[in-house]
Each structure stands twice: as C-alpha cells, then as structure tokens.
Image: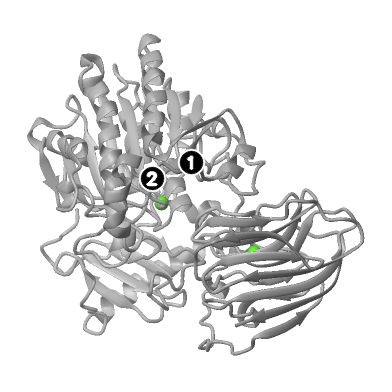
C-alpha cells in the first residue's frame, strides 16, 4: 500500500515487477470487456473531470454509475507506445516502440521497430485463447501506416476481426471532411494501400462507424454464448478537428479549442449508443466491464489537463496522466458505485494482468508482465495501487516540444513522489504530487536521499530495456540564428539537412532548374515533409509544384505532360502562398496555398525527398538528370 499521508516513503526493493501467473481456476462466468481508448484527450476534458467549456453526458453517466480514477497513468505520452503498453501489459520500450510510428525512414532514424512484433503477449490473444470473441474497432497505430504497408494484419495480434483507420492494416474507415460552406474533401487517402475494404465517411461520424461495427460483433458473440473483448479506439479527439458541418462555422469562430470541443461533444454523443446498448441489455449490463481512458495528454491549444503541467509528448503529468472510468454494474462493488478514487496509483500496463484474472485467462507461457494485477481496485474492492514504481521514457524525437525545451528524458512515479531527470541522472526534478500535482515546486535539493534512490532505480530500469536514438536526437543544437543566406546553387544528389538546410519560413521561394526527365517520374527538389514544406516533382509525366501547410497539400499541376528533352522551369511561391509554374517560358499552372510558409524539420534534397514526403509521388528518387537548380528566397 502507498502511504500518501506521509512523505517518509519506503523505497521498496522489488525487482521490476515480476508477476508470473500460475494456472487459474476457470470461473463460472467470464465477463465481457470493452476498452474505449480515446486519442489525445486531456486529463480535464470530460465534464466529470472539470471541463466547464463542454458537456460529456454519456461519459459522465458512466462515471456516476461506476468509478472515476484520478491517478491513472498511461505508459507513454504519445500514441503508438501507449497503445503497445495497454495491449501487452509491458513497457513499450521492450518492443522498441517509443514514439509514434511514421514513415519507414523516420522510424529508423529514431531507433524504432517498424511495427509491434506479433509475438508480444497481447491481452487479446490470451483472452481469445480463453474462449473470448475478440474485436478491434478503431485506431490501431501499432504498425501499418504511411509507407509501411507490409505490417502484419491486426488479426495476427489475437483479434478475430478488425476495422481500423488510416494507421492500421486491413478494413478501414477513412474520413471525408466538410466545412460549414459544404466544401467536401478527403484526408489520409494514401492509406488505401494499407488494405481494403475502405469506407469513406464524414470524419464526424467515424466513431459511430466503429460502434456500428462493434455492436453486431457483440451480438454475434452473445448469440454464440461467447464472452467478448472489444476495443473501441476512436480517432477522436485527435487533430485535425472536423466537427459536423452544421456546427463547423460556429466552432471555428472559437478557434482551435472551439473545434476541439465540438469534436469532443460529438464523440460523447456517438458513444452514448454503445453505452446504451450494453446498459439496456440485461444480459450484458451485469456482466460487462467498460473501461474508458485516453492514450496520452492533449495537444496544445486543444484539450486541457486542469492543474496538471504539460501536454501530449511530455513526461509531465499533463502528458501521461489520464482519466479512467470503470463501469460494470454487476461487477463493481456496490459501495464503490459513483465514487472517485483519488489515491490509487496504477497504469495501463496493469490492466492486462487485471483483466486476465477477471476473465479467468492465462498469459502466454513464460510471460513476465511489467503490469500488476489491480483488479480488486478496478472493481472498487480495494484501494491498493500497484506495488512497483511506474517508469517512463520520453519519445526519442521529443526533447523539445510545444514551447518546452530541454525536456527531461526519464521519469518515475513512486507513492507521492515523482522524479524526472536526464538519461545520465542529471538535472533531477522531484515533486510531491499530492501536495503539488502541477509539478511547480522542485523539492530535489531538500530531499537528496529520495533523489538518489529514485534516480538509481530509474537509471537501472532504463539500462535494462532496449534503447532508441533519443540521446543523439536530443542533443541541444547550437543556438540557431536565422540564416541570412538567400541564394543557393545546387546539384542533383545534394542533401541540406539540419543547420545547413535553407531557412525559407516566411519567405518567398523561387526555383529555377533545367532537367531531362527521360520519361521518369520523381522529385526534382523537396524541402520539408508531410506537415510543412514545398517540392517540385514529376508525377505521371506532369510537372507539379506542391506546398504543404499544416498537413494540407496544395498542388499546381501542369495540364500537359513534359515533352522529351531538356525542360527549363521556374517555380515560384509568393509570401502569401501564390504558386506559379513556368515551363520553357510558358505559364503551365498556378495555385494558391493561401499560407505563409513555415520552416520544416526535414531538410532539402535535390532529386529525392527524404524522411517525410512533401508531395504525392508515383516515384520519389528521380531517375532523370538535373543539370542545375538555383534557389532564391526573398
Ligand atoms: Ca494519441
Ligand atoms: Ca522530406
């Protein structure tokens, strides 16, 4: 038990949790389990967690009829690793998934696996082996996204069936967007390559789409007299924010947060269908456990974390603490219904061993979970937290983020204490989270013994698990002063990255080049990635000038294919985003990106586009010959 009332904590010397299950007697009943894992929602975003700017009545009702946990953690402040933790009961570092999975090259750069190894001890597989019908409905993001299109299907991870979004293999729902003026668009269309069938739906209805697939799955399991384990993991409330078109204009007038809150309320309304389906069916009502939490903290300017410091990607509480609601009228202790648990400290890795006991299921032979069985606490029969500390490591690519710089690399929560430090134990910060949940008052200097003992444990944990490239990527760059260089003369194969990349933010761009495509598609020049940047490329024989701004790609596409021989081209982007393509002295295309260019992290390449792609290419590396490229920024 944790002694929250006392600061004299016992630093227990338990090894990194060793919870090996023996054989469990199979019980008479195996409750159904539904896990709702929301994307990027802040700790204080449900109205029952203090949001006064929006209403979440469906979720609030679950909390009133169940238990709301205030000291629950996820095991990473970012998508993919948090998903691995809740799915396996193990720290995600063990599986080398420590930041969001992206393009192959970017995954390699950060020292990540390309996808979760299907050998991981998936909760789903253990439940399936115990007789459960298992279904995953929603965002996956544990492999199969961007150009990584040969990841294993979700059904290789212990699920009987799956329906996902743009970050997973197999059947999927992809989003249509609609603004207040009725303008319809599509996003993430590239994800079609990750598997079909694809159903295009309004972005604001996709959560309902997942629920509409989950309910028949549950009905079928019921009809077959099988217990079910169902994940409903919405894209909501992750950006970009697309509330229903009829709400769009009003929400947008309130800025990013207005759009976010409209998405949050829309999600809650959609979930009421799922919760009502379970609540109103007497057979399900008393034999189903529903858990609701968020995969990581909120995006800056969107959600909120109440008193907690920091955002998504940070190891501060705002990045890793999540609301948790547990509902199950036939399972939760009667006296605990409608209560708030403000003291029990545990985390997403603890759910796997807990749910296995609930289900009378066994882990794979030889599995050692980092998680502990806290089932009695989930059901309101105990207030014990996990015994061992909870350890955290930051995503390798998030040393500086959201205006925070030089962020700590590691963190540990033990009892009331939280320690954050760098990989080598330096720059320790120590907070007493009961007195100071906002991590304002660093008590490290006054508590050298606690700092020493927690640092030792934290470094030992970090040393024992696989590393990523966080140390290298987190090295502080020398203070970057804006480059005054405005003219560049470049050759095919040039790669200007890091400090040598041209500074184009807020400037106009002029590209003058001559090349012979020899009939090949490919990139003439690209700077940036799929969030910000610009590129000149040949696609299906036609020259294209592309500008990315906040993920949105605007293209000026030449109406006619290039003729054979050398082409002389001038491509310009004005300071306010007006684009023009001139081929052999004739204006071939214009477009308006309606933006001011923003400097991107990715560098500039001639004849290629490395890391993340700016444009939509049929071929990235250019097989033709580029005789020269002149770049000018004003
Ligand atoms: Ca997320
Ligand atoms: Ca790039």
What percent of the width, then of the height, locates residue 572?
A: 66, 71
Give the alpha-carbon distance from disc 2 to disc 1, as whole Å.
Answer: 32 Å
Report the label total. 2
Residue 624 visible somewhere in the drawing: yes
Residue at 10%, 42% in the rendered image:
339
Residue at 41%, 81% in the rendered image:
426
Q: Residues within 10 Å of mark 2 (few under 14, many from 20)?
A: few
Nearest the viewer among 415 and 164 is 164
Q: Residues within 10 Å of mark 1 (few under 14, many from 20)?
A: many
Q: Secondary structure at mark 2?
A: loop
Where is residue 543, by image quadrant? bottom right
| Disc 1: which residue | 140
Residue most toward the front?
586
Does the closest atom of ligand 1 sit within 8 Å of the Cβ of label 1? no
Residue 303 visible somewhere in the drawing: no
Q: Is residue 538 above or below residue 512?
A: above
Which numbered disc, 2 or 1, marks the residue closer to the eye?
Answer: 2
- Answer with mark 2 or mark 1, whichever residue precedes in sequence: 1
What percent of the width, then of the height, locates residue 21?
A: 40, 37
Q: Are marks 2 and 1 in contact (CB under 8 Å)?
A: no
Q: In the figure, is residue 259 to the left or right of 424?
A: left
Residue most toward the left?
335
Residue at 27%, 30% in the rendered image:
289
Q: Secondary structure at mark 1?
A: loop
Residue 181 marker: 2
Q: In the figure, is residue 375 to the left or right of 39?
A: left
Residue 270 marker: none
């Amino acid at each position: 038990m944790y002694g929250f009332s006392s600061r004299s904590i016992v630093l227990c010397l338990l090894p990194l949790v060793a919870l090996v299950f023996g054989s469990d007697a199979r019980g008479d009943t195996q409750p159904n389990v539904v896990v709702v894992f929301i994307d990027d929602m802040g700790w204080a975003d449900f109205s029952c967690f203090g949001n006064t700017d929006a209403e979440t009545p469906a979720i609030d009702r679950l909390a009133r009829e169940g238990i709301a946990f205030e000291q629950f953690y996820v095991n990473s402040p970012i998508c993919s690793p948090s998903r691995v933790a809740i799915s396996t009961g193990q720290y995600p570092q063990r599986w080398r998934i420590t930041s969001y999975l992206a393009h192959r090259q970017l995954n390699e750069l950060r020292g990540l696996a390309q996808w979760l190894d299907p050998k991981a001890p998936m909760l789903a597989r253990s439940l399936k082996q115990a007789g459960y019908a298992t279904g995953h409905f929603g965002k996956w993001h544990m492999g199969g996204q961007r150009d990584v299109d040969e990841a294993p299907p979700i059904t290789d991870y212990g699920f009987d069936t799956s329906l996902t979004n743009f970050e997973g293999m197999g059947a999927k729902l992809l989003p249509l967007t609609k603004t207040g003026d009725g303008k319809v668009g599509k996003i993430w269309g590239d994800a079609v390559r990750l598997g079909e069938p694809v159903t295009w739906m309004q972005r604001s209805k996709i959560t309902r789409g997942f629920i509409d697939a989950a309910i028949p799955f549950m009905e079928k399991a019921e009809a077959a007299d099988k217990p079910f384990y169902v994940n409903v993991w919405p894209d909501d409330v992750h950006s970009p924010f697309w509330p229903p078109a009829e709400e769009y204009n009003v929400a947008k007038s309130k800025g990013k947060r207005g759009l976010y809150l409209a998405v949050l309320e829309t999600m809650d309304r959609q979930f009421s269908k799922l919760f009502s389906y379970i609540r109103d069916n007497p057979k399900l009502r008393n034999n189903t456990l529903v858990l609701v939490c968020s995969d990581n903290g909120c995006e800056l300017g969107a959600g909120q974390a109440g008193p907690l410091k920091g955002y998504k990607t940070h190891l501060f509480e705002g990045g890793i603490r999540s609301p948790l609601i547990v509902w199950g009228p036939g399972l939760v202790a009667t006296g605990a219904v409608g209560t708030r648990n403000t003291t029990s400290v545990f985390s997403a890795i603890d759910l796997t061993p807990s749910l296995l006991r609930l289900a009378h299921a066994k882990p794979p032979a030889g599995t050692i979970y980092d998680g502990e069985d806290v089932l009695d606490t989930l059901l309101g029969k105990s207030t014990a937290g996990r015994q061992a500390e909870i350890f955290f490591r930051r995503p390798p690519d998030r040393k500086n983020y959201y205006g925070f710089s030089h962020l700590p690399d590691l963190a540990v929560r033990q009892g009331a204490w939280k320690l954050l430090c760098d990989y080598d134990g330096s720059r320790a910060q120590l907070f007493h989270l009961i007195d100071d949940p906002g991590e304002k008052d660093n008590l490290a200097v006054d508590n050298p013994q606690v700092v020493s003992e927690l640092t030792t444990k934290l470094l030992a944990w970090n040393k024992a698990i696989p590393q990523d490239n966080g140390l290298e990527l987190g090295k502080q760059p020398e203070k970057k002063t804006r480059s005054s260089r405005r003219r560049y003369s470049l050759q095919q194969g040039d790669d200007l990255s890091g400090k040598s990349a041209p500074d184009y933010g807020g400037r106009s761009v002029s590209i003058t080049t001559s090349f012979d495509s020899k009939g090949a598609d490919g990139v003439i020049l690209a700077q940036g990635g799929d969030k910000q940047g610009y590129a000149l490329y040949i696609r299906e024989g036609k020259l294209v000038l592309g500008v990315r701004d906040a993920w949105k790609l605007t293209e000026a596409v030449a109406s006619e294919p290039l003729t054979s021989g050398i082409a002389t081209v001038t491509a310009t982007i004005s300071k306010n985003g007006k684009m023009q393509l001139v081929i052999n002295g004739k204006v071939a295309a214009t477009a308006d990106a309606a933006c001011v260019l923003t400097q991107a992290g990715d560098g500039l390449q001639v004849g290629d586009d490395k890391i993340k792609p700016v444009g939509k290419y049929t071929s990235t590396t250019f097989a033709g010959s580029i005789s020269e490229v002149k770049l000018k920024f004003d």
